[in-house]
Amino acid sequence: MTTSLLNLLYLAQSQTPVPHDIPLPLPADRGLIVGVLIAMFLVHILFVNLMLGGTILTAFFQGRSILKGSNDDDILAYEIAKTITVSKSMAVVMGVAPLLAINVIYTVYFYSANALTGYVWIGLVPTAMTAFLLLYLHKYTWHSEFMLKHRKLHHSIVMLALALLLCVPFIFLTNINLMLFPDKWEQVNGFFSAMFINHNVIPRFLHFFNASLAVTGLFMVWYVGLPSFKVEGRFTDSSRADLKRRFYKLATIFTLMQFVIGPLVWLTLPRNMEMVGMNVVLTIGIIFAVIAMILLAKEINAKDEVIGASFKPIVLLLSVTVLCMGTGRHMYREQILIPHTDDMEDETAIYVKSRDAALELQRLNEAAGGSALNGELLFTKTCATCHAMDKVLAAPPLIDVAKTYKDNPQGIVTWAKAPGRKRKEFAPMPAMGHVGDEKLTAIAEYILKATGNSTEAQPAEPTTSKATGDATPSTSTQPVE
Amino acid sequence: MDFPIFHMDWAGNRMLIAVIAIIHVMINHPMAVGMMPLITLMEYFGFKTGDKRWDTLAKKILFICFIVTTTAGALTGVGIWLSTSLINPYAIGSLIRIFFWAWFTEWIIFVLEVSLILAYYLLWDKMQGSIKSKLNHIRIGLALSISSWGTMAIIVAILGFMMDPGDWTKTPGLITGALNPLYLPQLAFRTPMAMVGAGLFAWFLMIFFVKKDREFRNKAIRFVSIWCICWLPLLFVGAMWYHDRIPQMMQGNIDVAIATQQWANQSNNLLWITWVSAVVVVVTVTIGLLKPNFMPRVALLIPFILIIAMLGQFERVREFIRKPYVIGDYMYANGIRVEDYPLLQSEGILKYATYAHVREITEDNKVLAGQDVFNIACTRCHTTQGVNSVVEKFDNLYGKDKTWDPAAMSAYIKGMHNARPFMPPFPGNDKELDALVAYVLQIKETGETLPGMQSAGIVIAPETVRRSPVRISAGDADASNVTP
């Protein structure tokens, strides 16, 4: 009773497609590929964070410098702009490994999600390309006379690049969210419907956005601390310690906000069972983040001489947090897919069995059929598509053609291998060299025999082929004029 | 069959891959693989002769290549992957499983390449200080040249594999896949092609970079002319070797590849034009060597455009000659594996399709079933009314204004792979064939088109759901107790 009720409930909801997997073994131990996925994805996302965070900060500082005329802001904006173009190249190249790994482990899920959001998914390429070109344009025209005169125009270049860059995470997040829920695929009609199959995409975007500014803040603390980064004589209102403090504050504010957004991401995760393991790992991550927050608060309040002393521990602690979040995310992915992957494996196994049986049957049939050169059979397979004995199909009838080649099968073979075009009313005949001389000769001999143009033997009964002949109503088509 | 079907019914799916791939190759070969060694050589030459002008010119050329390769070059590279996995996920999914480690190695070299080009360009001025640091900078250029070539060398193995997997179908494995008979010839062809392309592109850029200094411009032209002349013989040897190795059946298709079917007889002319452009390149390069100041600006553009056109032409032919396969002998261009054919041809593709409206064909659902069959079996290459339209194909065969005979069409489709060896055999059974014909007749009549699943969404074939409810009721034992 309850089972059938559940069945009804299930059917009333959407159906879940259960495709067959690619029937090839994984190229390596699954655990190893998972390791590549988690580790390299974090490296990738680090550079993506630096790219996006850097672009936001460049746009912000340059905008403020235009509004308030501050020279410090302009210098800072340019310094950050110089780093973006490096981060973006690294972001792309580091994205390849996780993409490769996800392609291998989640082949069916990932490609299905890609196909369902196809236009926007492939739109990634021109979007990112344009954004990158704009970032170069922005960087390399910074000190040009024209741009110095038209600073707002110059600023609009980075704003446009930023707008494009902000689209990219939505595309990725929508895809990797969609791939986890095959039961929702049926509801999807294009990208925008895919974005809202659940409520997880927007919180994750905010999570990523905050992370970008937090990571870039920390990066800048390190960057302005480099001996090659000149402060004295360049900056009018800030010392090196001021700059460090400013970026520490930035990192702190956005890390703090993660304590709100993070739980929101967690709450909006659809779940099909208790995810204890994931929750434990995430909690460990949060504990490390809390310790990092305490150190960050101390750094902000530290004296000028000692600011930056806890930088390494902070980075280390937050790296552990990030690793925990990445691992937890992977555990979620695995667990949510278990029931579907089981179904898919079963379906694939059944399919492979049927396929092998059919393959074996074909082999047996072929072995029984022998491999003698049967001109008629070869004709049916090779030529009957366009030629019939006494009817016009897509090509002239053979009783017509064969007269030219009386007792000359070799002539037919030569023509077939490199056909000319005698009758303009038909499309030109394709070259048939791929069939091979032996078979072509057998076909040619059959044609001549069947049409009574061979003196070697009695004219055979004109046999219309099974494929074309009898089924074809002879009057209904006069295909080509 | 197993993936939602992405389909661009107007431009055709192959157009998407072709546009991205051709842009990528046109950037990658001349501007990365070929140009990096040329720039490094130029820098070294300037260092040896103490002539600063070489250094300035090399850096200017590098700037252009740096911008283009790290934006359009890198992203079209990823774009090839994204577009192929949209259009033929079956093929790319299989290739990635076979070639995971090759791709992984390529990725490592790719990381190296990107890091090196960043260092090579961004540190150009900083590393001018001492002889030692300048030499180190030149070494970076050398390492960059090697890694640029390395990424191409690996990806060519995969391309060669797709055309002819050698013994792979018998003994699966990475090495047998990579050592396929087309690998070395293709590499021997592409390498000098990239080098000559780089020379011509550098030449083209010199028009803008060395305007006034006539004496130096002549020197520079002579320099790249020698570069090109050194590589030209290798280019011809490579091209011949490559052409020679293409399997017999594929060679039979080449004349169709260069133009469309109707143009088959004119393919000789096209081949001839290719030769002409080759000769023009040789002549231009020779003039550049002997009488560099004789070269007017426009003349510098011609050979560059020609070599780009030749390159594009070769890519097009390569794409075509692997037909009817997408992975030689293993998977047809429609994404269906050769080993799946016996099953599907007897029992039908719709029986095993994940996404279809119809499982059992009746008189009532015939056209809809035909649409499913068309979607699965034809859309990777054909559209309804757009580029390479199936209606247009039959128009050519039977006449646009005539009534087409369904029986003749069925017979045609059933045997077309014999008459037109670039076509895969029809993968379904006879009922499906009739349904397909009914669908084609309808779209000819109505002019209707077929939206891809990226906009229309999916329809899940009827009984695939059978397994899941059982699992859910078993797994949710607690929930079922609560249900009154």
Image (cartoon, grey):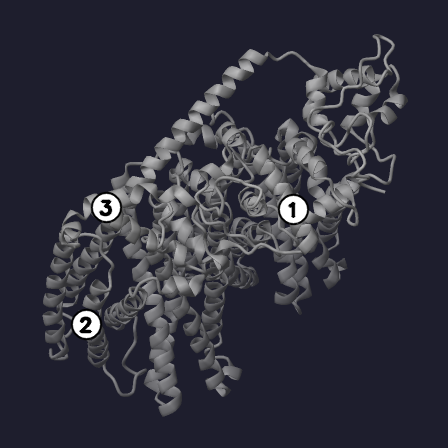
Q: Within 10 angstroms of label 1, few (less than 14), some, or many (20 or more) residues?
A: many
Task: Give the percent coordinates (x, y) of residue B410.
Answer: 66, 36
Task: Give the percent coordinates (x, y) of residue B70.
Answer: 47, 59
Left or right of A249, for residue B351:
right
What residue lies at 48% left-to-right and 29% top-to-bottom? B343
The reply to whether residue B126 is in sight is no
Q: Chain of mark 2?
A: A
Badge 2 amino acid: Val
The quarter of the displayed image where residue B252 is located: top right
Of helix, strand and loop, which one carries label 1?
helix
Q: Decide which of B38, B168 is in the foreground and name it.
A: B168
Q: Decide which of B202, A274 is in the foreground and name it.
A: A274
The reply to whether residue A4 is in sight is yes
Q: Chain of mark 3?
A: A
Of helix, strand and loop, which one carries label 2?
helix
Q: CA distance from mark 1 to mark 2?
A: 57 Å
Q: Are marks 2 and 3 in one subunit?
A: yes
Q: Chain of mark 1?
A: B
Q: Which mark is residue B440?
A: 1
Badge 1 amino acid: Val
Marks 2/3 in contact by CB < 8 Å: the verdict is: no
Left or right of A149, for residue A424:
right
The quarter of the displayed image where residue B249 is located: top right
Question: Can you say whether A18 is above or below A24 in the image?
Answer: below
